[in-house]
Amino acid sequence: MATISRLQRPSCTKLLRTQACSRPLYYSRTQSYHSYEHDQPASFSTTEEAILSASLTHVPSHGFSTAALTEGAKDAGYLAVSTNLFPRGAFDLINYHLVTQRLALQTRKLLPEQKVGVGAKVKALALERLWANKPFIHRWQEALAVMAQPTNVPGSIAELARLSDEIWFLAGDTTVDTSWYTKRASLSAIYASAEVFMTQDNSLNFSEMERFLDRRLEDVRTVGTSAANVAQWVNFTGHAFTNVLRSKGVRI
């Protein structure tokens, strides 16, 4: 069987590694690609996995909090003091949700068998990831507030970058030029804004959020094909990055 792997990425992918992200998943000092045929380092230990997965069931009632972690530890058969495994508290629980839902995109059968464009696949994958927030949507603004705390912002932004990269990879993007960066930066901004929009969307099945996502993706497609010079592209990308930071609560 042929190995399915990421193409060699430009060297500045090292920027995606931050000290605040204690468990880098796809990025390491010696590996610049990802292969689904080779084992990846475990994201969480067996104990962490047991407690964190159990804790998620308490988020609807307790929010992303130490209380949810304590209840999860009890459910998993551990003492309450076991929550000391998670020094970042609520952010460790939020990060578990972010990481596991990103990785889950690899195995979900959501893309149609017939040939469709990369853009349609990107939208389908982005929506699939957004739907994963539905069980906690009434708690997601609280989660965003935790992610916006200064010590958590680097880890939040890094995980958002990984999600964007994962979506483009699974959608079949094979670019190796400078658009590798622009596509991921733009998608990060779009996803973050759609995530915030979803917390305020009261429409049936979040239909307004889906239309919002459609409009933003179309905006990127239009700008990407009509930008006549570097200055216009820099202006667009700058606004996109600013929106990502603002969605995470950074004051700009």
Image: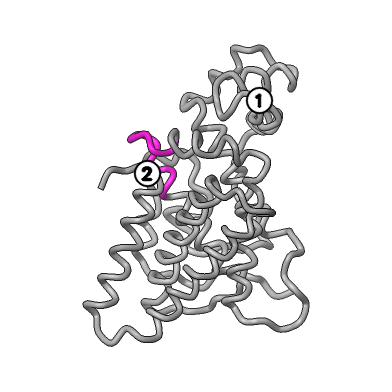
In the image, residue 3 lies at what x, y percent? Answer: 66, 71
Q: Which comes before the other along the chain, label 2 or label 1?
A: 1
Q: Pointer 2 and pointer 1: residues touching (CB < 8 Å)? A: no
- As shown in the figure, which amino acid type bears the numbered disc 1? Ser
**Image point (65%, 25%), residue name:** 61
Residue 84 colored in magenta in the image? no
**Image point (69%, 33%), residue name:** 53
Q: Where 146 falls versus 73 (above or below)?
A: below
**Image point (51%, 56%), residue name:** 194
Residues shaded magenta = 147-157
133 on left or right of 87:
right
In the image, residue 115 lies at what x, y percent? Answer: 71, 84
Looking at the image, which is closer to me, 8 or 232? 232
Residue that numbered label 2 is attached to: 154
* Quarter of the image where the N terminus is located: bottom right
Q: Quadrant of residue 151?
A: top left
Q: Which mark is residue 61?
A: 1
